[in-house]
Amino acid sequence: MSTGRIEINDLGIAYGANSRRVEAVRQFTLMTTPGEFVALLGPSGCGKTTVLNAVAGFVQPDAGTIVLDGEPVRGPGADRGMVFQQHSLFPWKTVLANVEFGLKMRGIKKSLRTSQARGYLDLVGLAGFEDAYPAELSGGMQQRVGIARTLVNRPRVMLMDEPFGALDAQTRLNMQELLLNVWREVRTTVIFVTHDIDEALFLSDRVAVMTARPGEIRDVVAVKLTRPRAAEVITTAEFMALKARVLAQVREESARVAPGPRR
Amino acid sequence: MASMPGAETAPLVGAPAAQAAAAPAAPAGLWRRRVRRAASLGVFFVLWHVATEWDLAFYVRFQNIPTPAQVLAEAVDLFGAAGFYVHILASLERIWLGFAIASVLGIGLGLLIGWFSFAEDTLFPPIELLRPIPAVAWVPLSIMLWPTERSSIVFITALGAFFPIVLNTIHGVESIDRQLVRAATSLGAGRAAIFREVVIPGALPSIVTGLSVGMGVSWLCLISAEMISGQFGVGYFTWVAYGIVKYSQIVVGMLVIGVLGMMSSALIRVIGARCMPWLPRRAKGGS
């Protein structure tokens, strides 16, 4: 596994013009190694989603560079797949057609893309739901389709923007475990945006704690908990110690959050 | 309508195979509602009959209005002869021609105007300018513009349907969730693919609404145009019946217009539902 190396250097992004200009991200620097799982953790409005959107190519940086495997990011592309918080499946396509979408865009013929899409639906535990429409699925199932739809493109990096943020607590736990199992299979680089400390620590190899806006890296915490991890890991002393460290930082940053526009 | 029994559209979260077996039988309440609706229609006909049979005249005058029985007899006569069908076919031809032209232009322009700001700037201003003019007001100009009576009536019909179709299509395109566009681009979709795979299906529910409204307006315009400047058509027939004092024929003409309009709208609804299988189906309350 040698693809999926992201280098974000001195990233700066601001929104608005003149006196209403708001700096969302400032001097943000982060590197990932191929196949690494990195969480971006911070208070809401700290610019973590902005960083993700810049890596995806949806937002043009005002300063700094984003380089993926030696090539600068210039715009959206299938090598960086995005899993959104919710409601991002095409409502008019069946589950299977949603997952096939990326392959269809690459011009892969129908029989081949169906078999590949089925494989990924199997991986996320949705075999048997091929012909359902997104509106017929629960929120957790929709997110699983979203993950399968992204992974079928074999992206170098999977960008996840609070993908479980809209789910209830129990579903969220199940989804976290499912994501780790899936990730163990595909071993793509993951950048996972969240404001949930437990979620960040449970999933990641490293957790990048961001400051309040304008978002910078405040601390990068290496999570050396053994894999595969089960939900019980969050009760261990090692986890607790990491959580205490991160919690103190997030508390401080949350207190500094000033009201203002976010994106 | 909110508390219709049996109107729940339960999301099928279980195994997809289980849903086929679970088609519910009509609940008992449904029959009561059907009886009530039939009774409502019955009362309407009784009131009509009473008012016309007794020649009621209390400011509104029923002396010259035909009774239901007279209308029925007239309808039997008319449908028994070939002449009436000529009028019906003339109207139907104009409606479908006008509506088809309006649909092609309205959907096509609406998609372009809604999605491309260049198209919006160059194509939308004249549409905005002409939109408030009722299509019927175009009748004199239409007669001058078009070489035949048929083409000028088709023009009026198309004009009436065009505006609701184009405006609803624009609205549909503009209300597409930008996140879906982002999702498509990050899955490798180019500009053409986004238009085909996201913009068109995303706007489809609004397009169907526009077609449905447009169908109603095009009937309105057709009948008005036929009454003003026709030689054939149900509108012409109805207006002429007044002139030659065939009062039962007026009512038959009106009813035919109503039934044809209703059938056209139903057709649009059925086709729309076929094209959009992802929308939750509303359980029917026995209508």
Image (tube, coloured by chain):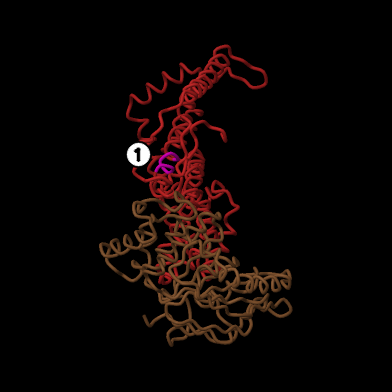
Task: Judge whether B38 appears above or below A51 on screen.
Answer: above
* Quadrant hosting residue B54: top right
Chain identity for the colour brown used in the image: A
Residue B206 in picture, x, y percent from top left: 50, 52
- The three-letter amino acid code for the residue at tag 1 is Ala
Chain identity for the colour red used in the image: B
Q: Residues within 10 Å of mark 1 (few under 14, many from 20)?
A: few
Most common secondary structure along the magenta stretch: helix
Q: In the displayed orientation, state which residue is furthest to the left.
A: A111
* Quadrant hosting residue B52: top right
Task: Judge whether B119 appears above or below B200 on screen.
Answer: below
Q: Does residue A228 appear to the left or right of A122 in the view shown?
A: right
- Over which residues does the magenta segment extend? B265-270
**Marker count (numbered):** 1
**Residue beneath label 1, please?**
B20
Nearer-the-camera pick, B75 or B64: B75
Residue A67 in picture, x, y percent from top left: 48, 85
Which SS class for mark 1? helix
Q: In the displayed orientation, state which residue is furthest to the front.
A: A237
Nearer-the-camera pick, B264 or A256: A256
Residue A188 in picture, x, y percent from top left: 41, 74
Task: Judge whether B10 appears above or below A226 on screen.
Answer: above
Q: Is residue A146 magenta?
A: no
Nearer-the-camera pick, B199 or B41: B199
Mark 1, chain letter? B
Residue B247 in picture, x, y percent from top left: 50, 23
Q: Who's the residue at 73% across and 70% down the image?
A: A255
Q: Who's the residue at 48% across and 81% down the image?
A: A32
Q: Quadrant of the N terminus of chain B?
A: top right
